[in-house]
């Protein structure tokens, strides 16, 4: 699925907070569009797995930072159980 021309994952829709942050950071957006749908799925699931809103906010910020630093998947994440 694509939200506002921002591609999502395989089984996860793109949440508004992730979409908003990606559209505000061109380097992260460029890498996001270049990674595979499975990799995007992993990032989305990792963010959505947060139990507290503060943790989720930190994960969204880290997603952008990690993408800008060349990471293509979340570190230390066992993987999305939903695929």
Image (cartoon, helix red, strand yellow):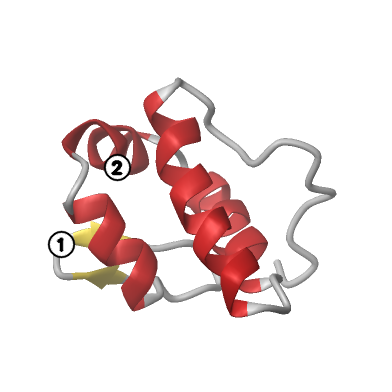
Task: Out of 38 and 22, give the one closest to the viewer.
Answer: 22
Is 7 left or right of 45, judged from the image as shown?
left
Q: Residue at x 55, y 45 (%)?
A: 39
Q: Which residue is mark 1?
A: 5
Task: Out of 58 and 16, give the one closest to the viewer.
Answer: 58
* Residue 59 rendering spot, x and y as whole percentages: 57, 55
Give above or below for 55 relative to 71: below
Task: Out of 79 and 26, give the one closest to the viewer.
Answer: 26
Which quadrant of the structure image shows residue 81? Answer: bottom right
Which quadrant of the structure image shows residue 55? Answer: bottom right
* Residue 11 rendering spot, x and y as whole percentages: 56, 72
Mark 2, other Cα within 10 Å: few <14 / some 14–19 / many ≥20: some
Q: Which residue is mark 2?
A: 33
* Residue 73 rendering spot, x and y as whole percentages: 60, 37
Q: CA distance from mark 2 to mark 1?
A: 10 Å
Give above or below for 49 relative to 41: below
Give above or below for 6 relative to 4: above
- Quadrant where the C terminus lies? bottom right
Q: Secondary structure at mark 1?
A: loop
Give above or below for 63 relative to 30: below
* Residue 10 rendering spot, x and y as whole percentages: 52, 64
Q: Residue at x 44, y 21 (%)?
A: 69
Is 8 left or right of 24, judged from the image as shown?
right
Mark drawn on residue 38: none
Is 63 left or right of 16, judged from the image as shown?
right
Which quadrant of the structure image shows residue 54? Answer: bottom right
């Amino acid at each position: 699925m694509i939200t506002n021309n921002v591609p999502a994952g395989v089984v996860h829709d793109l949440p508004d907070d992730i979409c908003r942050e990606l559209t505000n950071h061109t380097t992260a957006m460029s890498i996001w569009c270049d990674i595979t749908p499975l990799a995007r799925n992993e990032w989305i699931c990792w963010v959505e797995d947060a139990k507290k809103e503060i943790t989720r906010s930190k994960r969204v910020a880290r997603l952008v930072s990690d993408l800008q630093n060349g990471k293509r998947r979340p570190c230390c994440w066992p993987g999305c159980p939903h695929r």
